[in-house]
Image: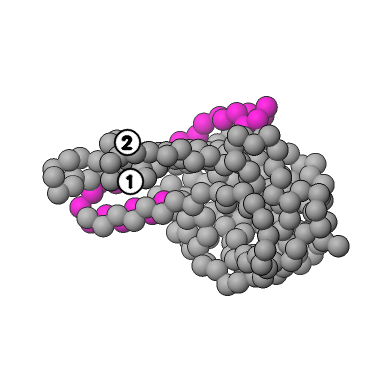
Amino acid sequence: MKALLAVLLFPALACAQTEQPTVKDSEFDVYDLESMKAGEWVLKESVSKLPMDSRGAFATVSHRERLACVRVDEDKVWIESSNCDLEAKELVFVRLWEVDRKTRKVLKAWESMKGAVAQEAKVEKGPERQRQLIDIESDSGKNSETAVKEKLKVGTTEVDCTVVKIENVRTEKNDKTVKTTCARWFSAEVPFRMRVAEVEACVGNQIPETASKDLKTSQACVKLELATSDDTWKIAESIVDFGTDAKPTVKTK
């Protein structure tokens, strides 16, 4: 049995800037930037329960992130990202990204605390498959996949979704049966849509081929739930609000 579970959590809140910050050029590779419009924004929340030590102690990690497209032209988009812990009252750490619309590579980036003049970041080459949420590779477990239509309330708006569910059941060396479930809700009505029409994008986004045929081009993942039957870990990520009225806030000069 081979199992690889890779979980991407939202970035932690930066507390200070001493050296030139660095970012990865593949940060927005998962998104369909060619259809993105100025003003589109989404607010995401992530709550994770993860084992921290051999004694079975757990830690809860929670974050909030806002992504906003604040400017577009024929070749580029400018996206602002804001992050904080869920207990914080406002998003105070911000980044501005200048991204090529076709290649989806970050060209320039700046970051700062809210209201301060942003510092330019160094852009480094990153992996081609960012935001990989789950990857199950099994030669002994049993997988099942389904895709059904469903309505989901995001903020104050009810949107039409396709729910993709993957279930993996495996038996470990001690004969203990472990079930891992991944459920993801996709909607074409929510901004920051994912590239699900391309084969390589489906692989990178962990969308099974049997389910991807039911998804339209460029849908947003508005909700994600991962869990194991033995309570080893749980993670829930959701888009809790979205809109089309975002304005630039980052100061670069």
Classify mark 1: helix, strand or loop: loop
Label 1–label 2 contact, CB within 8 A:
no
Residue at x 18%, y 45% (from the top left corner): 171
The vertical placement of 121 against 35, above or below, is below
State the image coordinates of residue 114 (x, y, percent, origin top left): 76, 48
> Residue 139, can we see it?
yes
| Horizontal relation, residue 222 to residue 172: left or right | right
Colour logic: one colour
Within 10 Å of the Cα at label 2, are there few (<14), some (14-19), or many (20+) other Cα atoms?
A: few
Quadrant in which the N terminus is drawn: bottom left
Q: Which residue is mark 2?
A: 231
State the image coordinates of residue 147 (x, y, percent, origin top left): 43, 40
Three-letter residue code for mark 1 = Asp
The vertical placement of 106 against 202, above or below, is below
Within 10 Å of the Cα at label 1, are there few (<14), some (14-19), or many (20+) other Cα atoms?
A: few
Quadrant in which residue 41 is drawn: top right
Residue at x 50%, y 34% (from the top left corner): 149
State the image coordinates of residue 106 (x, y, percent, origin top left): 67, 66
| Horizontal relation, residue 44 to residue 4: left or right | right
Outermost residue toward the bottom in this view: 125
Q: Which residues are magenta?
A: 134-159
| In the foreground, 180 or 232 | 232
Taking the magenta stretch, the answer to whether it contains residue 139 is: yes
Quadrant in which the C terminus is drawn: bottom right
Classify mark 2: helix, strand or loop: loop
The vertical placement of 174 against 199, above or below, is above
State the image coordinates of residue 89 (x, y, percent, origin top left): 68, 34
Q: Earlier in the sequence, mark 1 or mark 2?
A: 1
Three-letter residue code for mark 2 = Asp
| In the foreground, 90 or 5 | 90
Q: Which residue is mark 1?
A: 53
Q: Give the alpha-carbon distance from disc 1 to disc 2, as whole Å.
A: 14 Å
